[in-house]
Amino acid sequence: MADAHRLHALEMELAGRKLIPVNEDYVSQRLIEMDMCFRDAANYRKALTAVELEVLDYLVMKRGVTLSTASPLDVLSYLVCKDLGKKVNTVVHMRACPELGARTRTACKCPVRMNHASLDSLIGRVRRIFNDAGRTTEWVPESATGNPCASRPVKEYLRAVKREQSMAGVTPNQAVPFFRDKLVQLVLHINAELRKERSRLKGEESALTLTLVRDRAFFCLDLHTCKRGGDLGKLLIPQIIRLPDGSGLMFNMTVSKTLRGGSSHSFGCKRATDNMLVCPVRNLEGMVATFKGAGLNMSGGYLFRQCSKKRACTSFGFGQAYLQSAEISRNLKAYLQAAGIDDGESLSSFRPGGGIELAMVGCNMFDIMEVADWKSAKIANHYLKLREVLGKDSPADKLARLGGSAQSKAGREAYRKANLLRAASIAFK
Ligand SMILES: [Zn+2]
């Protein structure tokens, strides 16, 4: 009875007051988002656990120590043994080897080792594992305490490996740039596949047609905005604004590899006036319309959705999860191979390709660094090789004087030739 009175009193009290709105759509949307956010973090944990397991296995089973007793020597032993692993593919030619300077080996028996850049990042991960196990300080040899990865022997080993590889002429692997003319070929291939599938289905959609439409929009946007593929996959629909005159779209990215919560990176892309085939705006609009037509809610959530055959309650395998780079990378490779235009490009080819395209139409380095989110001129240069591509009296410089639309096409060709020449420029053999 007392409860009924209290409830009545509460109702009287609340009448006419402003309360928090109840919005079930909001609740479910928010819970889905947080679930994705959580899974995102879980993915990172999984990657760490793979290294963790390997390190633990090595220390405990092969060296008879634990995370709290391992010494720098145990860590070194693990790092050296990594050179015998499966994914190791950097050929380090001996100084007397006739093939010194080549990326591969044909006749010699020089060793294959872990690339120094990979070693560097592996040491960072192992260091973190010890850190998480409570060994947070620098290594103190006298008391044999602290983080064994933060010890002099490990640091010196890394330095020695770097030196050995630079003496052997091991250069960092650069992604093969993906250019606009290749994008045209890729889109033509996707369009042909799309026509084939749609005529088979007589106008119906399928997981394949949706995937083709999504991938086409993704590749066009990636090349025109010079973004990391993984970051584009996390773009949210509400972060996209249409320019008032309809001439293009503005994106406001808040999550990327180098950007975490709290700040954002804005970029835009304009509607093409000449080559509509690879226009990112047109292809994106086409994708959203197709997905809406297939019954997907495109008013919120991720712009590019993952296609999974396993998940229930989805349209053609598309749900709310974001497109992961593994899926789009796999598709890219398959399209390039099927179209017979595979020159070793990958998802990481779009950023350098887009950057070089910008350089060829006359954008300055700082603008390109801003667009492609390159933090230093050194990294930008590494990708752009500006001195070779655009330096005074370089092929591109000469071609620039030709002007017109032939310019960029010829410039690309010049870049490709310069690239091939560099690969085959051993003059005295
Ligand atoms: Zn050799």
Image: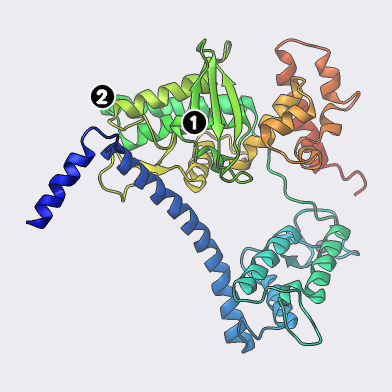
Could you give the CA–CA distance between mark 2 and mark 1, rounded to whole angstroms?
A: 35 Å
The residue positioned farthest toward the left in the image shown: 1
The quadrant where ligand 1 appears is bottom right
Q: Amino acid at mark 1?
A: Gln
Between residues 321 and 282, which one lies in front from this camera angle?
Answer: 321
Residue at x-position 85% and y-position 21%: 397
> On the rendered structure, is 223 left or right of 29?
right
Image-quadrant location for residue 400: top right
Residue at x-position 73% and y-position 10%: 404
Which quarter of the rendering shows the N terminus?
A: bottom left
Residue at x-position 67% and y-position 70%: 127
Judge whether 40 appears above or below 387 on screen: below
Q: Residues within 10 Å of mark 1 (few under 14, many from 20)?
A: some
> On the rendered structure, is 119 left or right of 313?
right
- Which residue, given by chain and number where applicable, does mark 2 sit on? 202
- Which residue, given by chain and number where applicable, does mark 1 sit on? 239
Image-quadrant location for residue 174: top right
Q: Amino acid at mark 2?
A: Lys
- The secondary structure type at the circle numbered 2 is loop
Between residues 314 and 332, which one lies in front from this camera angle?
Answer: 314
